[in-house]
Image (spheres, helix red, strand yellow):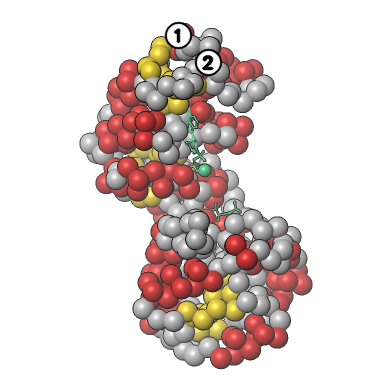
Amino acid sequence: MGAKRGIGSAPVKGRRVLVRVDFNVPLDEHGAVADDRRIVEALPTLDHLRTAGARTILLSHLGRPDGKRDPRLSLRPVARRLGTLLGQTVLFADDIVGVKALESVARLKNGEFLLLENLRFNPGEEANDPGFAQELVRLGELFVEDAFGSVHRAHASTVGVPRCLPSFAGLLVEREVRELSRLVGRVERPYAVLVGGAKVADKLPLLASFLGRADRLVIGGALSFPFLRAAGASLGATAVEADLGPVAEEFLRRSEEAGTEVVLPEDLVVELPGVAEPVTCLLSAVPADGLARDIGPASRARFSEALRGTRTVFWNGPLGLAEDPRFAVGTAEVLRTLGTVPGYHVAAGGDSARVVAALGVSGSFQFVSTGGGAALEFVQGLELPGLSVLPDA
Ligand code: ADP
Ligand code: 3PG
Ligand code: MG
């Protein structure tokens, strides 16, 4: 992926600039922003536009309201948090398009910001409806794409609008593309990929994309279970995604042909019903009622060893049920070891980024992406519609 035309060259002074941001942030039980990282990472672009005297109209989605208004998924709390971060009031428009939205935009002065309500309250957003895209286009004169986390979606705000307005990449998108590009194409080797998490069926294409590209593929978390089962492990009462046995076997065979070493857990931390203290088990010795929750001490040492001596490491997905401190030990130890390995290290994934912060291991990474699905598609080398639509630099 080559560089895209950036906002540095955009004539924004006094112009109405539509900026797609990814303010799809977690909210707490009171509806307040629980983690503002995605908002903070958009600040360089917003600051640039303010200094340059643009009239900025911010577009975002929040959650998956399915084309209907849902007060629990309003962006209003996000406008407040953004205002605090910018040190300036951020205006808010309940109406995404139409006369009232046009009126709100008309009142904007140079250097001011207006956030529109959740785009996904309108069914036209996800459907990439041309009529809805045209109504958004009427609000602005230029378009800036800074929602890296959403560029894998071909929606009205990510593809429909930039097709119709002079478009530019924002500073966050530029940075994400520059950093993640170091994981595709010519990569400094040895190159290790550390993958965990759940949703095995979803992540198989990601794993497969590294065969022949990475030197080592280290697989932990629930993602490893079908591979362990294919190799004969019982795993007790652990839920293992069904029907993946043959796929896992075929995958391991292909990895040998491709010359990519696959490293799997050798032992597991297992939860027994009604017992607070977990036990460590070899793969062949998980009790019938046991639930595999984390990688065990031998695996932690093996995984750490697999990372030593590498030059590039990509990580996605916790190696255990890391939300529970009892089962975050494996992830914590391996990521701490990574901090002692010189080289270029990138983390991506919504849960993974939160785990980096919760475990205090941000120092182990040169870059933590704001993308979930978008980053995973990018490192697979897939085409992302929200980037393809932008003109090259
Ligand atoms: P990301 O959002 O970073 O891509 P995923 O969504 O794939 O990551 O995976 C995160 C989820 O996987 C977490 O909720 C984590 O607790 C869960 N997980 C990982 N290993 C296990 C395990 N052994 N048992 C249960 N859940 C697990
Ligand atoms: C994300 O959180 O990955 C992005 O905001 C995209 O959200 P989506 O998966 O609901 O399209
Ligand atoms: Mg996740």
Q: Quadrant of residue 306?
A: top left
Query: Could you give the CA–CA distance between mark 2 and mark 1, rounded to whole angstroms?
Result: 11 Å
| Residue at the spot 48% in from the left edge and 56% down from the top edge | 28
Q: Which mark is residue 27?
A: none
Picture layout, residue 308 above or below residue 286: below
Q: Nearer the viewer, residue 264 or 241?
A: 241
Q: Residue furthest front?
A: 274
Q: Where is residue 65 drawn, in percent x and y?
A: 66, 58
Q: Is mark 2 within 8 Å of ligand 1?
A: no
| Residue at the spot 62% in from the left edge and 66% down from the top edge | 71
Are the residues tagged 2 and 1 within 8 Å (C-beta)? no
Q: Where is residue 388 drawn, in percent x and y?
A: 59, 58
> What amino acid does circle 1 point to?
Ala
Q: Where is residue 207 drawn, in percent x and y?
A: 53, 32
State the count of labels. 2
Q: Quadrant of residue 134?
A: bottom right
Left or right: where does residue 209 sit relative to residue 348? Answer: right
| Residue at the spot 43% in from the left edge and 39% down from the top edge | 323
Q: Which mark is residue 289?
A: 2
Q: Where is residue 33 drawn, in percent x and y?
A: 46, 62
Residue placed under numbered mark 1 in the picture? 285
Q: Is residue 151 visible?
A: no
Q: Nearer the viewer, residue 15 or 323?
A: 323
> What amino acid does circle 2 point to?
Asp
Picture layout, residue 347 above or below residue 25: above
Q: Is mark 1 within 8 Å of ligand 1?
A: no
| Residue at the spot 42% in from the left edge and 61% down from the top edge | 36
Regarding mark 2 in the picture, which secondary structure is present there?
loop
For discs 2 and 1, the disc positioned in front in the rendered view: 2
